[in-house]
Image: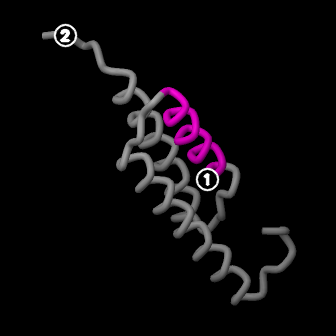
Amino acid sequence: MSDDITELQAFETIARFVHNEGQNCIMDGNPCPDIVSVLAMVERLSRRRGYDSPVIAALVDDLDTHNTECIQTLREYGDHDHGY
């Protein structure tokens, strides 16, 4: 059995890792705009390499949505001091 993975699988693995890191931040009540940006960059890089991954696109959309919701919730609770 070979441990070789394709380049697309590598991009998707990295995207899943970054997404999980962002979700952990959000679960702790912390927005993660920097992590959203990194995940979007992984998507852009994979597209430049010729891959249009619905997995990566879904991870970007999901994290961006949850990050936006986290920011909105913090603002509703009066947190306007962090420049989100």
- Measured along the vertical axis of the image, is residue 76 above or below residue 32? below
- Taking depth in this image into account, of 53 and 69 the one nearest to the observer is 53
Q: Which mark is residue 7?
A: none
The answer to whether 55 appears left or right of 33 in the picture is: left
Give the residue at mark 2: 2
Looking at the rendered image, the quarter that the N terminus falls into is top left
Residue 49 picture location, percent across and down: 50, 27
Give the residue at mark 1: 36
Among the two numbered marks 1 and 2 on one chain, the one whose residue lies closer to the N terminus: 2
The answer to whether 82 appears left or right of 56 in the picture is: right
Q: What's drawn in magenta, residue-wise?
A: 35-49
Crowdedness of circle 2 by 10 Å Cα count: few (<14), some, many (20+)? few
Disc 2 residue type? Ser
Crowdedness of circle 1 by 10 Å Cα count: few (<14), some, many (20+)? many
Residue 22 picture location, percent across and down: 55, 53
Q: Residue furthest top?
A: 2
Assess whether mark 2 and mark 1 are in contact (beta carbons under 8 angstroms). no
Residue 38 picture location, percent across and down: 63, 43
- Taking depth in this image into account, of 27 and 69 the one nearest to the observer is 69
The answer to whether 75 appears left or right of 39 in the picture is: right
Looking at the rendered image, the quarter that the C terminus falls into is bottom right
Magenta-drawn stretch contains 11:
no
Tell me what residue is drawn at x 36 percent, y 49 percent: 54
